[in-house]
Image (cartoon, rainbow, N blue to C red):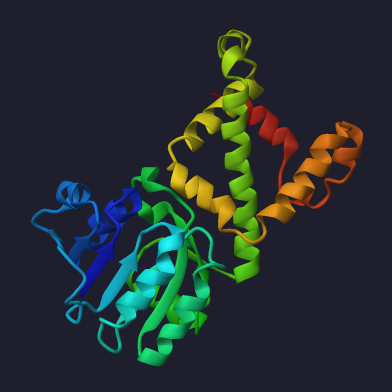
């Protein structure tokens, strides 16, 4: 299969390397230096998007805000029966453009890898799949390309979850920024809770600022999620806050979670 990958960022590189093991892969990015870094014997550089009829499939690994325009452009240049896939972290801004292209005889597939480029082996990953036209067909196609677990989700459920993820990134980055003057004191007086929270906070800094920003600015559910969080935060009442935690206790084991802190 001939596959075009647009976007030579970290996820574009990850999927290029994996797919090139069994398929012909070409990669395109406005940043030619990025393309040169990943291109080689198995991954061919593409200088433009003018002649795309030879590609059976395209995978968009670009910022959320760029997906709709690219989908429209590619759908006018790829042949009937081809497939356009996109991996955006928020689906509400892109799903309408994906659902329009079936009229042109092109299949749209919208999935979100629930892992980053640091995963190493994508066989151990998971991805959410949001229906474009036929979820069974879309999962079947993805299964023919990728080995990771595929989880069907509704558009709203997915984007609400991603709104909370965006909030996590905002919290961790804000914590590091606001506590910067006290960083040495926190290091010296680091409890297990502080130590693990710092690890998670530091890890979120590996995500690009563009993606972190779009997680909150492109998500229609973020303001609602932020409002709920600030209401609890401003109450400063642990008894009241903990009294509202019910469904989480069906999912998480607080005793095991505490013991886990001391295993490493």
The x, y position of residue 49, in whole percent, is: 21, 70
Q: Is residue 59 left or right of residue 199?
A: left
Q: Residue at x 46, y 66 (%)?
A: 111
Q: Residue at x 45, y 75 (%)?
A: 139
Instruction: Please identify the quadrant where the C terminus is shown.
Output: top right
Residue at 58% from the left image edge and 8% from the top image edge: 188
On the question of residue 147 being in view, the answer is yes
Left or right: residue 119 compared with residue 199:
left
Q: Quadrant of residue 17?
A: bottom left
- Horizontal arrangement in the rendering, residue 205 relative to residue 164 (left or right): left
Q: Out of 143 and 4, give the one closest to the viewer.
A: 4
Front position in the image: 227 or 21:
227
* Nearer to the camera, 231 or 194: 231
Q: What is the total number of numbered labels drawn onto the structure image?
A: 0
Q: Position of residue 202 (x, y in %)?
A: 50, 29
Locate the N terminus by quadrant: bottom left
* Residue drawn at the location 35% of the way across and 70% of the way down: 70
Q: Residue extending furthest left?
A: 41
**Is any part of residue 263 visible from this angle?**
no
Residue 152 occupies quadrant: bottom right
158 up-or-down from 77: above or below:
above
Vertical placement of 250 versus 22: above or below?
A: above
Q: Position of residue 75 (x, y in %)?
A: 33, 81
Q: Position of residue 43 (x, y in %)?
A: 15, 59
Q: Image quarter for residue 232?
A: top right
């Amino acid at each position: 299969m001939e596959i075009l990958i647009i976007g030579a960022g970290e996820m574009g590189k990850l999927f290029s390397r994996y797919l090139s093991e069994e398929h012909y892969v070409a990669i395109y990015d406005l940043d030619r230096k990025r393309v040169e870094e990943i291109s080689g014997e198995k991954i061919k550089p593409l200088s433009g998007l003018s002649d795309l009829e030879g590609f059976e499939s395209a995978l968009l690994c670009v910022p959320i805000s760029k997906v709709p325009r690219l989908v429209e452009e590619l759908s006018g240049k790829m042949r009937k029966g081809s497939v356009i896939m996109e991996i955006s972290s928020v689906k509400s801004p892109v799903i309408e453009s994906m659902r329009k292209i079936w009229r042109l005889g092109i299949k749209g597939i919208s999935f979100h890898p629930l892992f980053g480029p640091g995963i190493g082996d994508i066989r151990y990953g998971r991805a959410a799949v949001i229906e474009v036209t036929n979820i069974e067909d879309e999962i079947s196609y993805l299964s023919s390309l990728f080995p990771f677990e595929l989880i069907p989700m509704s558009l709203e459920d997915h984007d609400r979850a991603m709104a909370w993820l965006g909030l996590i990134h905002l919290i961790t980055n804000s914590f590091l920024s606001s506590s910067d003057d006290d960083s040495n004191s926190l290091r010296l007086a680091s409890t297990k809770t502080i130590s693990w929270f710092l690890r998670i906070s530091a890890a979120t800094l590996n995500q690009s600022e563009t993606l972190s920003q779009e997680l909150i600015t492109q998500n229609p559910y973020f303001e609602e999620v932020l409002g709920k969080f600030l209401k609890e935060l401003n109450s400063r009442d642990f008894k009241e806050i903990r009294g509202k935690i019910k469904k989480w206790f069906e999912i998480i084991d607080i005793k095991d979670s505490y013991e886990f802190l001391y295993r490493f």
